[in-house]
Amino acid sequence: MSLLEVRGVSKRFGGVQAVREVSLDVRAGSIKAVIGPNGAGKSTLFNLLTGVAVPDSGEVRLEGVALHGRPPHQVAARGVARTFQHLRLFAGMTALENVMVGAHVRSRAGFVAGLLDLPSTWGEERGIARRAREALEVVGAAGLAGQDARSLSYGQQRAVELARALAADPRLLLLDEPAAGLNMRETAELARLLVRIRERGVTILVVEHDMGLVMSVSDEVAVLAAGEKIADGTPRQVQQDPRVVSVYLGDEGC
């Protein structure tokens, strides 16, 4: 059963066709990767899925409900969370406070009311703090809760950003190059973490350049090149597809 359905999505920026009629499915409870050379349209596709950009044509549906055309906060409220290729943590806030921002997506009062510390929000804020601590524990960063997020190592900041996304209690988690900047040990830890997150019932769609990570954790892989999908299947099927081999090793190399 498909949790996410993408049908014929296209996006042009001026004279550049960033994404052209891309269709794909993400099965509930799976890890699916989107790979391709730089400029293939991967990040643009993520922006179209999360409401950061609006497709020129095509449809995006989560459990049959249309997401295309909705602003990012409405997409998030439907159960979609994401991380970014470049870290976006808030300076001057602890790791716990950064993660609490993600949990506020599901709150009734909202983030601003929480910042104002109104009596009506106190009980909900305690619940949000508890969920944030649980998310930090999931990613192995519980001990960092009270530290300034921007003072942490790069790998620790990556973990905090992932915890922030998990604190939103997503059904679908979109990860944009989560292994970027990580060393081999940290990447291996990330692979194990992604599997644990999937086992908790969260479906994952990941854009990633680290082929070792992609092939070790993914149930399915979609390949983009020049804005178009050229392959979609199991890791083994994709590795053996002549078009994929041509893109990575032939005249169109990375």
Image (cartoon, rainbow, N blue to C red):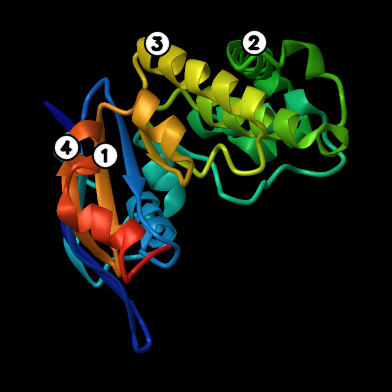
The Cα–Cα distance between marks 2 and 1, rounded to whole angstroms, is: 29 Å
Mark 1 is on which residue type?
Val
Return the residue nearer the eye: 126 or 205: 205
User: Which label sits in the foreground, 3 or 4?
Assistant: 4
The Cα–Cα distance between marks 4 and 2, rounded to whole angstroms, is: 36 Å
At x 39%, y 62%, the residue is: 44
Q: Which disc is residue 221 wearing?
A: 1
Closer to the chain start, of discs 4 and 1, is 1
Closer to the chain start, of discs 3 and 1, is 3
At x 38%, y 87%, the residue is: 14
Closer to the chain start, of discs 2 and 1, is 2
The Cα–Cα distance between marks 3 and 1, rounded to whole angstroms, is: 21 Å
Label pair 2/1, CB-CB below 8 angstroms: no
Mark 4 is on which residue type?
Gln
Label pair 4/1, CB-CB below 8 angstroms: no
Residue 236 shown left or right of residue 195 in the figure: left
Q: Which disc is residue 237 wearing?
A: 4
Label pair 3/2, CB-CB below 8 angstroms: no
Closer to the chain start, of discs 4 and 2, is 2
Mark 3 is on which residue type?
Arg
Label 1: state its secondary structure.
Answer: strand
Above/below status of 131 relative to 226:
above
Q: Which disc is residue 137 wearing?
A: 2
Return the residue nearer the eye: 50 or 220: 220
Label 4: state its secondary structure.
Answer: helix
Which residue position is annotated with label 3?
200
